[in-house]
Image (spheres, grey):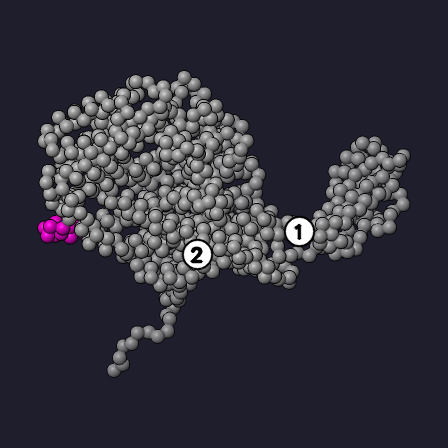
Amino acid sequence: MTVPTPPTTRGALERREARLAWSLLLPTITIVSLVIILPLLAIFWISFKPVGLADLRPVAPVIRESLRERSGEIVIEYRVRNSSQQKEIVGMGFTDTLHDGVTLGTLPEPCSVDGRLLRCAFGDVEGGFNERIRIPVTLDGDPDVLEEIVEGTEPAGFGSGDNILTNSEFTLDNFARIFDGDEFWAVLWATTFYTVFGTIGALVVGLFAALLLNKSFRGKGVLRGLYLFPYVSPIIAVAFTWVTLLDPFSGSLNALLIQMGVTDSPINFFGQRPLALIMVTVFEIWRYFPLSFLFILARMQSIDTDMYEAADMDGASPFQKFWYLSLPMLLGILSVLFLLRFIWTFNKFDDIFLLTGGNAGTRTLTVNVYEQAFAISNIGAGAAAAVVIFATLLLFSFFFFKYISQEEGL
Amino acid sequence: MNLLRQGAVTGAVIGLFWAFVMAITVSVTLSFASGLGFRPGSLGCLILGIGGGLAAIYVRDARLVIGGFVLLCVALMFTPLSPILFGEGVPVLWQVMAALSFGVFTIWPLKVMLVEAHPGALSRHAFEDAVIRFLTGFGYIVFTAVVLIPFYVMVMTSLKSQQALLRNPLDFSIELSRGWDLFRSYSELFGQFNFGSYLWTSFYVSVLTVLITLLFSVPGAYAVARLRFRGRAAFSRSILLIYMVPMIVLALPIYIAFSMTGLRNTIPGLLMIYPVTTIPVALYMLQGYFRGLPGEVEEAGLMDGLSRLQVIWKITLPLSLPAMVSVSLYVFMIAWNEFLLAFMLLDDPSKFTLTRGVAMLNSSEIPRQHLMAGAVIATIPIMALFLGLERFMTKGLTAGSVKG
């Protein structure tokens, strides 16, 4: 008699199910790799490249054509120019189709005519190349009409420039620039302060808000909705409102503080160290406490009330109940929230960018990416900063999966 | 600690704190409402707070305590001992109102907070209850003020004129005499700044983002939740991992690629990126929900000869309609509020989304009230959705807020 054993190979049904699963996932996988994985790889590539913002426009010949009269004779004038001031173009030139009614005179040296096709070739030209080609012509017809026709068509340029993004020139300068002494430490400090205090602050404030609303009373729904406002509204609206409210010249808060006698002269909240960093952290807490509030409240309401009744019987005081009963029950959700919010605060860019633009000691790693790439126009250095962020995140997510995945049920 | 738990000391300390809280609250509220000068008076708060706390403990008759306290506040109004001090030119009517509201809102809650307190040593329970009631009241005021003030300022500033704003930044009173002119910033935004078109762009971009996201994430979520295949665990982990990648890291290569292919400044370009930022969240939320659905119904469908796709379409989707609403709202909110990509990828004012349009208003040449009016226009639709469908929205926020 054979002992029944579980199948060791995959059956037809199982394989069909797996095939179906992958085909359902295929669209997602494709689009996600196109828009997320590919750019991630690109950023590693770019971070080793000396690329500036100006290099994004490819080097190409620029040709302008005009028909004009010059010392008695009519000429077609081509202005030919290299779009880059530095880089050379290999085999540059242009072609143009001649119109009926236009007959060319003597051709200058680089040009030749084949049927109705004019072709001028300049060979390899240096950066900053700029030349005029004048060809005398005789016109057969109304000059004004012909001028429109001639200038209405574009000559086609050719020649290839070296593309910095695809050539084999690599450099470590970008990373050297990112890890450059004092600036790097300042950025790291701002990031750490913002992330740690923003996360903890939002958690603690959210916990308080949840404690406030963890009882039933009339108007509770309204308050709960109200406390979610900062999180739900567009970042751009609330950030600009804060900027307006705290403006040193026309801001209401400064006017209020002066009237109350707290300060004599207006305070520049977002413009001076170290206040600016504290204020962006306060903003972060203000905007994201609703999230922790929502989670903590949901968890609180699922705690069994029997426990509290038992504690009441034993004569526990309210603070004892909070400290010995509620807090331990909330520890799980608090740690999940801490890790998630930590990562998301670390990733935050919009808030600081809109509030201070990274000035006054508020430049975090994410703002540094923008600052390097667009303000200083050094795309390579921006990419290097992005790589640093990504590496740090990988480290975080290692911890995340180590400690959180069981709780999240994944 | 023992000293603090003496009824009189507890009452005095809580009374003192509460009087200061109320003095500040009343001053700020009235200042913001009228633009006139109100500020808390320390000496008055000190005396009235301690006195009120003690009175709440020692005097049994609630009506006597409340009445006496309020009368005292009004009487002290014109002396330097007033709990609220007035700037130049505050009308007497406002002064009386300030003193009255301070009196009522100080002593009445104090009486409630100290209801279990009595002269002599308090039990730990009574003491902590009083402290907690104080903290609760304090919490309600602080949270409500902190949340409401920015929104109040946003709306009111948008209704002011430039001169009025510069004259007194604290004056948020509405000049009803201006009539329809109050909404001048709005009409200028819609008339001269093309905000109608931004609103429409934002709307259809968000709706299309929701549709595309669902199209991709529903089959994916179903596969992860229901079907068995190798690499399932790895796949659901990588979903989580992917939405931890910050947008700014991706924005740079996307900017480069779009610059080179000419997709920058196009709405289709934006529509290629937005859904991808939301698909992982949506997939994660939906697979959680699909797992909670009873599998038996689907198996019955399979037995009756439906294919898997028909099962999804005819059984799973109708059953998960509430979850779909939550996910759609959440994705809509993300797309509507999105700023970074719109800011980097759109330069052409004719193609701006609303957030990009508001960002454009942040310049020194454009008056502040226009910026605030733009902020209001961007906020109102999402607020209306939120308030109207709060139940779904809150569920979406809780399920999806792994993303921040």
Residue B54 point in image, percent of width and height:
15, 34
Kindly identify which residue carries mark 2: B242
Residue located 18% across and 26% down the image: B69
Q: Residues within 10 Å of mark 2 (few under 14, many from 20)?
A: some
Q: Are marks 2 and 1 on the same chain?
A: no
Give the labeled residue for mark 1: A58
Is residue B143 covered in magenta? no
Q: Chain of mark 2?
A: B
* Of residues A250 and B200, the one drawn nearer to the viewer in this rendering: A250
Subunit under mark 1: A
Q: Which residues are magenta?
A: A303-316
Can residue B149 be seen here?
A: yes
Marks 2 and 1, how far apart at CA: 32 Å
Crowding near the residue tagged with mark 1, few <14, some 14–19, many ≥20 C-alpha atoms within 10 Å: some
Name the secondary structure under disc 1.
Answer: loop
Decide: is B332 above or below B69. below
Residue at coordinates 30% horizontally, 39% vertically from top-left?
B143
> Which residue type does callout 2 highlight?
Ile
User: In terms of depth relative to the viewer, which is nearer, B194 or A346?
Assistant: A346
Q: Quadrant of residue B180?
A: top left
Amino acid carrying mark 1 in the image? Pro
